[in-house]
Amino acid sequence: MRNIVNEIIAYECGELDEAQILQLFARLIKSRMAWSLQGHYGRVATALIEQGYISEDGEQIFYQDIVQ
């Protein structure tokens, strides 16, 4: 739990790159935390699911435009 809190803090401080943000949101979706945090997290999670970056069950889908 402590690690995810540190990741959320890093996200809010703008310290994560795009791949790290996807990893964080995949974890938040998988644990269902995305919908229990402030509304921003649920909206971003929903957008990432709708855009095909993360599945509804929190699995990352290949993201060729971000992976180098």
Image (cartoon, rainbow, N blue to C red):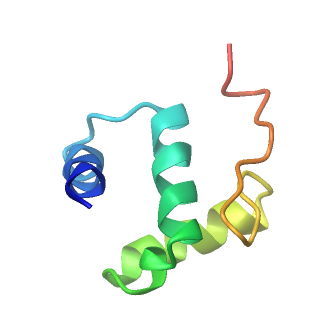
> Which quadrant is the C terminus positioned in?
top right
Q: Position of residue 28 (x, y in %)?
A: 47, 65
Front-lying residue, 18 or 33: 33
Q: Residue at 72% of width from left, 66% of height from top?
A: 49
- Count of marks placed on residues: 0
The residue sitting at the front extreme is 1
Q: Residue at 42% of width from left, 77% of height from top?
A: 33
Front-lying residue, 57 or 21: 57
Q: Please state if 45 lies on the left or on the right of 13 as rendered.
A: right
Q: Residue at 76% of width from left, 63% of height from top?
A: 55
> Vertically, is 63 above or below 30?
above
Q: Position of residue 4 (x, y in %)?
A: 30, 55
> Which quadrant is the N terminus positioned in?
bottom left
Q: Residue at 28% of width from left, 47% of height from top?
A: 7
Q: Position of residue 17 (x, y in %)?
A: 43, 31
Front-lying residue, 17 or 25: 25
Q: Position of residue 38 (x, y in %)?
A: 31, 82
Q: Quadrant of residue 13?
A: top left
The residue sitting at the top extreme is 68
Q: Quadrant of residue 48?
A: bottom right
Q: Please state if 62 lies on the left or on the right of 48 as rendered.
A: right
> Vertically, is 30 above or below 2?
below
